[in-house]
Amino acid sequence: MSTEQHKLGSGCGIRSTTADVLRGIDLSGRLALVTGGYSGIGLETTRALVGAGARVIVPARRPEAAKQALAGISGVEAEELREAAGADAGDAGVEVAELDLADLGSVRRFAERFLASGRDLHLLIANAGIMAGPERRVGPGWESQFAVNHLGHFALVNRLWPALARGRARVVSVSSNGHQLSGIRWDDVQFERGYDKWLAYGQAKTANVLFAVHLDALGKEAGVRAFAVHPGAIAGTSLARDIPPEEFAELKKAIESTPGNPGWKSVQEGAATQVWAATSPQLEGLGGLYCEDGDVADPLPPGASLVAGVADWAVDPREAARLWRLSADLTGVNAFGPAGTG
């Protein structure tokens, strides 16, 4: 495990909000991309970044719904993705474009449109995701949580690599303490021998962390750094939409009865860690780390589960390199070529 995987003493905490972590930070002239940036903590992330002066691209499976949701950002009218070659970040605002992370063709088309603009990308927050849904297959039969939460973002970041490298970007992969439920199931990644929605969710969230670990290892010479984050338990989002009400009530009860449970976060508190990881000067020179509550997380205590901390398997560089190779094979995309697969 990286010796840097421990708290910094950032001064942030469980109740820090996006306003708290952005205080004093000016993002004018910066271009950000936030997947899922039109609902839940993604919408709050977009709102906060725009408020700090950034221009934010929000890729969406349903662009018109995204534009309606983003209309609530004061003083901002969502527009179509800019395609003019040489266009710069421009003023603070929001651009919307079609992207379905479950469809690699859609990922390719979005990336081609963006790269045609010639713009540098300074921040990318891989926020979109699904949780504990019924068994679904996408693409060539991939398990949907692994495909949407991990493979779609893997392909997106690799295709956008030229813009990320020019912008010396920070990439933030939104994971969860749910990663503690399962490492990568190398003998059955696609759950072809029996589906368990919570193990599938755990594997996908572990993949989100491992992706950041290896992307950082590959990208740091180009000035691109990557982090993974756990937002916390957040009230009032649609992430749990696939969980039946009675099951969600039991889950909520279990979370609330966990020793040391800090309670549910607001969306402003839930979005704070990913905004902090994307923008904080405290993280200069660092990368490949898992963060929570506005700070770098400590290692998970032995035998613990669904508490603060990161599991060893999620920050193991050998596991990260192995997952990168698998992901490149599955998607057919690898910005770093054969030598970059670890």
Image (cartoon, rainbow, N blue to C red):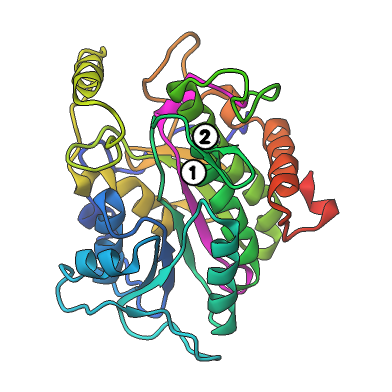
Q: Nearer the viewer, residue 60 or 285?
A: 60
Q: Position of residue 124 (x, y in %)?
A: 47, 61
Q: Secondary structure at mark 1?
A: helix
Q: Earlier in the sequence, mark 2 or mark 1?
A: 1
Q: Please tell me which residue is depicted at 44% across the width and 84% down the height of the picture.
A: 82
Q: Is residue 315 visible?
A: yes
In the image, 157: left or right of 291? right
Region of the chain picked out in magenta, as a range: 164-184
How many numbered circles does the render carry? Answer: 2
Q: Could you tell me residue 296's position as x and y percent?
A: 44, 38
Residue type, numbered disc 1: Asn
Q: Residue at x 51, y 51 (%)?
A: 102
Task: Verify CB contact (< 8 Å) between mark 2 and mark 1.
Answer: yes
Q: Residue at x 28, y 49 (%)?
A: 41
Is 181 situated above or below 139?
A: above
**Rendering coords of residue 167 (x, y %):** 56, 72
What residue is pinned by disc 2? 204
Q: Which mark is residue 319?
A: none
